[in-house]
Image: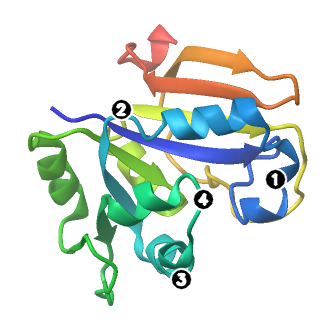
Amino acid sequence: MRTLFASYFISLDGVVDAPQNWHFPYAGAEVMDVVGDATKDVDALLMGRRTFEEWKAFWPGQSGYPLADFINSTRKYVVTGSGADVGWAPSTVLTGDVLAAVADLKARPGGRIAVNGSGTLTRHLLSAGLVDELHLLVHPVVVGNGKHLFENGAAAVGLDLVATRAFANGVVHNVYSRAAATEEGDR
């Protein structure tokens, strides 16, 4: 079975929205090594329609940026209820029962599946038990407003910290997997 992992730049106050406005002062060599390592063995990108449209508007025109070739050539699966003008190959639209479609995708042979951006999709997949790992690059900044990865009212999901690494610039890379404990009393 393929591994599905979600990666985020996240502020201390939980904001994942518009990282281009607050991430770059922290984009040192250590952080960029983590970003580059996150592409290893990945042969599929899973994203929601809004993230897909944002990336489609930016990445195809990029050259000389280390991730551009990877992003542009990797198969993209777009989750949307309204359909999407794919127009950015190689891409496939996933509609209907998203959880079943993602479970089927994970069951197919292949490399790792990455989710970047698409917080709503990640929350949905995490609560359904379809996210195997959550990678958070926690930045030492309070953004104050924007979309949060975890919204009020979401069901509790237990996670185990499997790796952590602090960088000289204050960013901390935390990797979580689904909790081994299955009952609330086990935590």
Q: Is residue 103 above or below residue 17?
A: above
Q: CA–CA distance between discs 1 and 2? A: 28 Å
Q: Are marks 3 and 2 in contact (CB under 8 Å)?
A: no
Q: Quadrant of the N terminus?
A: top left
Task: Tell me the CA gap for discs 3 and 2.
Answer: 29 Å
- Residue matched to label 1: 24
Residue 164 on image: x %, y %: 64, 17
Viewed as shown, does residue 79 lie left or right of 149? Answer: left
Residues 37 and 93: in front is 37
Q: Which residue is under mark 2? A: 132
Viewer-side label of 3, 4: 4
Q: How many marks do you count on the picture?
A: 4
Identify residue type, mark 4: Tyr
Q: Position of residue 144 (x, y in %)?
A: 89, 58
Task: Sort mark 3 into few (<14), some (14-19) or many (20+) by Cα contacts within 10 Å.
Answer: few
Does residue 96 sit above or below 20 in this rendering? Answer: below
- Mark 4 or 2: in front is 4
Residue hosting label 3: 57
Looking at the image, is mark 3 or mark 1 earlier in the sequence? 1
**Residue at x-position 78% and y-position 44%:** 27
- The amino acid type of the residue labelled 3 equals Ala
Label 1 CA crowd tier, 10 Å (few <14, some 14–19, many 20+): few
Kind of residue indicated by mark 1: Phe
**Circles 3 and 4: CB atoms closer than 8 Å:** no
Question: Is residue 40 depicted above or below 141 in this figure?
Answer: above
Residue marked by disc 4: 65
- Which type of secondary structure does the marked residue at label 1 adopt? helix
